[in-house]
Amino acid sequence: MKEEQNLRTKILRLSDLQQKVSQWKDEGKTVAFTNGCFDILHAGHIASLQEAAQQGDKLVVALNADASVRGLKGDSRPINNEDARAVVVAALGMVDAVIIFSEPTPKELIIALKPNVLVKGGDYKVEDIAGAKEVIGWGGKVIINPIVEGFSTTKIIEKMRT
């Protein structure tokens, strides 16, 4: 129980996270930001988060709220609720802060936090990434990490059903 309480100190509300990011920047730290559903955590997620963490001194992970996951993945998702997913992501050593967001994209969150680096996994084009234009506009950079082949939450769920 004590460990879970400590992990929860990494799961922040926007106002608290804004203060934390400001403090990190005042200390000269580079803040990287990434986002995702992270429903059933797998090796592909870990690789993506490790690569994101290498882009800065601190890593903020924005986690899609349950309603947002349903909108993206369908009514049978998420498998794990947002609180459980937040605790699991917060438990990862490379993650410094977790925030849950309900909006369709994390664009407003990115604007509010102003990270130095925006990291997205997948086969996106920079111009298609929510918040990329803004990050570049304030002098930050956008990094696209390739997807690690062979890992998919959807495929894990399908395999479990067969």
Image: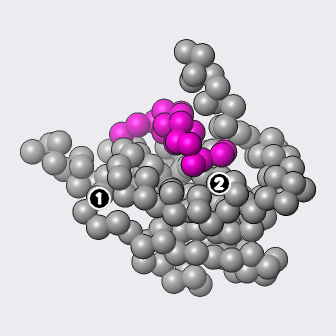
User: SS class of the residue under badge 2?
Assistant: strand
25 relative position to 118: left or right? right
Instruction: Indicate the amino acid at tag 2.
Output: Leu
* Cα–Cα gap, marks 2 and 1: 22 Å
* Quarter of the C terminus within the rendering: top left
Which residue is disc 2 drawn over?
59
Q: Is residue 114 above or below residue 142?
A: above
Q: Does 86 appear in magenta?
A: yes
Query: Closer to the N terminus: mark 2 or mark 1?
Result: 2
Q: Residues within 10 Å of mark 1 (few under 14, many from 20)?
A: some
Q: Residues within 10 Å of mark 2 (few under 14, many from 20)?
A: many
Q: Which residues are magenta?
A: 79-97
Q: Nearer the viewer, residue 148 or 110?
A: 148
Residue 71, image x, y percentages: 45, 55
Q: Is residue 90 visible?
A: yes
Instruction: Indicate the amino acid at tag 1.
Output: Phe
Q: Specify how the rendered protein is coloured.
A: one colour
Looking at the image, which residue is at 86% across and 50% down?
23
* Quarter of the N terminus within the rendering: top right
33 relative position to 159: left or right? right
User: SS class of the residue under badge 1?
Assistant: loop
Seen as rendered, the residue at the extreme left is 162
